């Protein structure tokens, strides 16, 4: 794989210098990566072009975040930026004052779509004309088009040099078949755009991705938390070196794996190797003490009655765990979460670990993109900006999400639905909720409330639910529902759901021979769940349904009749496979750890995790 072309996405001069010294072929120079990359300042473009010696520089031209449909005013701005970049590249090339190696390339990255998400041909012609001689890469806007192969052919006719794509809206691994076809088309003629593969490309999987697609060019970010400790990210030389090693190459500069950006005199940026940092002082002033040698994250699973936290290292093993009871009020619960995080980070540092990110999962309606808990009744939270609060408190990146949705993520990566692109995890505990994965992506919904399976009306006009509806699924099958109905219908007093399930199927009762009440309550519950899953199957067509939560511990007593009911309700098509969770109650912690490493720019570390490490006994301090 030594002939693989590597393109690195960077957002500052330091990142460009790391790439230049490492031996990366090209960089995509951006601003505002949180918006997916926008046009960098003229000063940054000029500084990078003057500073680098080897690496090709592709400058993104995108006036804002959001969609890729631009009005005439926005196109005017883009054209002006393109003309300025072309003029700057020409002036530097003419003088060659930077001493750049011959053959290094300056180009631009852009894209424009119509409101129907087709390639906007008139807009692209304007932009290509403004770019002049600069080679043009059409960015991942192509992945939003309804027919990616047709869009590629349009771009070929326009004279685009290369196309950055994941082969669809998911990751490159998920779009491997489309990518393989694009690579085949690119090889047909010399004027076909090069296929630049990007989207979840990591060191651990790049070999199999290249083998599956036949591609020879890849695009990635390689970031970790900035040593400034302000929650921002920087291009990580160690991650770059790891990726280059994965494609069979060493760094151009042998010190690249120990490189860190350090401010020099008068604000200049130089690159310091590990010896500079270890010395304690540099030309730019004091250097922070070296960080602990092992990275870790803090993962917190927030429940209605307790908050469970863990420090998880980069192998996926839990270093230590703590838990606290929930607060009496919403404000008190926030304070308790903050205190738990501080305690866990202190314990991590004491054990020689550097916390690079935090992942928090919580019940309720969660806007994961903004880090806001919109509503969580059990916690007394409404519109709580939990992510920003915690990030400001700890000074590290924080990602939050819904607890069941995150358990579904963990199960799809390491558990019963691993490798299945279309699956549903159903958590049956105090209530019932579902995590829906379609095409490898979590379904969130307009109100972030997708997956409220427990409130699907399973029995029209049935018993009242606390939500205000009647006949909801969780009235009939949930930890609270089964025990309540059993008692209300005359069953033995004081039994919880596990005890009721133990009496199902002709188990002898007191003076009755069999417990008919337990049989009836359980049969009603299984039938209600089957009705809910029948509707869900017809709507989203999962290949696998995974059962989790306390009620799922009923095992065969739940799975066997449920499979039969589900098959009967889907007479004209095959029923999805029903499996029990393989991660159990650990799913929330594991999913939160995945979120945390992603927040810290180290998402690739989870690619090497094993289930045995993830489920290893959790030590306590």
Image (spheres, rainbow, N blue to C red):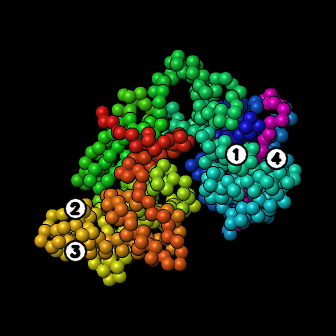
Cα separation between marks 3 and 4:
79 Å
Residue ID at (72%, 61%): 148
Q: Which residue is mark 2?
A: 499
Mark 3 crowd level (few <14, some 14–19, many ≥20, 10 Å Cα)? some
Q: CA distance from mark 2 to mark 4?
A: 73 Å
> At which x and y percent is residue 257?
61, 27
Looking at marks 3 and 4 on the same chain, the residue that comes earlier in the sequence is marked by 4
Count of numbered labels shown in the rendering = 4
Of the numbered discs in the image, which one, if any, rests on residue 134?
Answer: 4
Q: For mark 3, what is the residue?
A: 516
Question: Disc 3 or disc 4, which is closer to the eye?
Answer: 3
Is residue 405 one of those drawn in magenta?
no
Q: Earlier in the sequence, mark 3 or mark 2?
A: 2
Quick check: can you spot residue 26?
no
**Residue 102: in magenta span:** yes
Q: Could you say which is closer to the camera, residue 204 or residue 80?
A: 204
Asked whether, in this view, residue 190 is left or right of residue 332, the answer is right
Closer to the chain start, of discs 1 and 4, is 4
Q: Find the magenta span and give its range.
A: 96-114
In front of the other: label 3 or label 2? 3
Real-space Cα separation, disc 2 to disc 1, in angstroms: 54 Å
For the residue carrying disc 1, how many other residues have a C-alpha within 10 Å: few (<14), some (14-19), or many (20+)?
many
Element type where label 2 sits in the image: helix
Q: Position of residue 159 (x, y in %)?
A: 84, 55
Residue in the picture at 52% in, 19% down: 278
Q: Distance between the Cα atoms at labels 1 and 4?
A: 28 Å
Quarter holding the N terminus is top right
Q: Nearer the viewer, mark 3 or mark 1?
A: 3
Distance between the alpha carbons at the discs numbered 3 and 1: 60 Å
**Which residue is labeled 1 in the image?**
210
Q: Identify which residue is drawn at 67% across, 53% down.
A: 176
């Amino acid at each position: 794989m030594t002939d693989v072309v590597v393109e690195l996405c960077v957002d500052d001069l330091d990142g460009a210098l790391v790439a230049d010294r490492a031996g990366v072929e090209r960089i995509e120079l951006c601003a505002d990566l949180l918006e997916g990359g926008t046009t960098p300042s003229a000063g940054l473009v000029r500084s990078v072009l003057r500073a680098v010696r080897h690496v090709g520089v592709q400058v993104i031209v995108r006036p804002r975040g959001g969609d890729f449909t631009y009005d005439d005013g926005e196109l005017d701005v883009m054209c002006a930026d393109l003309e300025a970049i072309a003029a700057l590249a020409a002036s530097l090339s003419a003088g060659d004052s930077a001493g750049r190696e011959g053959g290094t390339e300056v180009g631009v990255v852009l894209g424009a779509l119509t409101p129907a998400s087709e390639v906007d041909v008139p807009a692209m012609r304007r932009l290509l004309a403004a770019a002049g001689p600069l080679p043009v890469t059409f960015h991942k806007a192509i992945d939003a088009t309804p027919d990616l192969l047709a869009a590629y052919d349009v771009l070929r006719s326009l004279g685009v040099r290369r196309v950055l794509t994941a082969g669809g809206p998911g990751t490159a691994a998920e779009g491997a078949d489309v990518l393989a076809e694009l690579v085949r088309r690119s090889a047909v003629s010399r004027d076909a755009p090069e296929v630049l593969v990007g989207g979840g490309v990591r060191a651990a999987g790049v070999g199999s991705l290249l083998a599956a697609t036949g591609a020879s060019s890849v695009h990635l970010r390689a970031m970790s938390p900035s040593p400034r400790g302000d929650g921002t990210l920087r291009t990580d030389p160690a991650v770059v070196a790891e990726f280059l090693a994965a494609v069979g190459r060493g760094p151009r500069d042998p010190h690249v794996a120990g490189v860190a950006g350090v401010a020099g005199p008068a604000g200049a940026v130089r690159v310091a190797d590990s010896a500079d940092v270890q010395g304690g002082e540099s030309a730019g002033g004091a250097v922070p003490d070296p960080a602990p040698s092992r990275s870790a994250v803090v993962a917190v699973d927030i429940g209605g009655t307790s908050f469970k936290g863990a420090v998880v290292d980069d192998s996926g093993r839990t270093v230590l765990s703590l838990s606290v009871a929930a607060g009496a009020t919403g404000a008190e619960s926030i304070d308790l979460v903050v205190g738990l995080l501080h305690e866990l980070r202190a314990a991590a540092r004491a054990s020689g670990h550097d916390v690079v990110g935090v992942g928090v999962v919580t019940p309720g309606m969660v806007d994961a993109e903004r880090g806001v808990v919109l509503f969580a009744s059990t916690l007394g939270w409404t519109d709580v900006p939990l992510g920003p609060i915690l990030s400001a408190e700890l000074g590290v990146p924080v990602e939050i999400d819904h607890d069941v949705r995150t358990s579904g993520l963990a199960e799809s990566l390491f558990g019963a639905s691993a490798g299945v692109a279309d699956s549903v995890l159903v958590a049956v505990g105090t209530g019932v909720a579902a995590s829906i994965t379609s095409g490898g992506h979590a379904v969130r919904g307009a109100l972030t409330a997708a997956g409220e399976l427990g409130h699907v009306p399973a029995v029209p006009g049935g018993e009242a639910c606390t939500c205000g509806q009647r006949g909801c699924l969780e009235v009939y099958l949930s930890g609270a529902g089964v025990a309540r109905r059993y008692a209300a219908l005359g069953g033995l007093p004081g039994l919880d759901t596990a005890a009721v399930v133990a009496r199902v199927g002709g188990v002898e009762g007191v003076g009755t021979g069999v417990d008919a009440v337990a049989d009836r309550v359980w049969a009603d519950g299984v039938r209600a769940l089957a009705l809910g899953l029948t509707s869900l199957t017809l709507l989203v067509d999962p290949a696998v349904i995974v059962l989790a939560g306390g009620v799922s511990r009923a095992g065969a007593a739940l799975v066997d009749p449920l499979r039969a009911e589900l098959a009967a309700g889907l007479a004209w098509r095959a029923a999805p496979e029903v499996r029990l969770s393989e991660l159990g109650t650990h799913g929330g912690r594991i999913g939160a750890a995945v979120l945390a490493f992603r927040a810290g720019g180290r998402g690739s570390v989870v690619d090497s995790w094993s289930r045995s490490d993830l489920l290893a006994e959790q030590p306590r301090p």
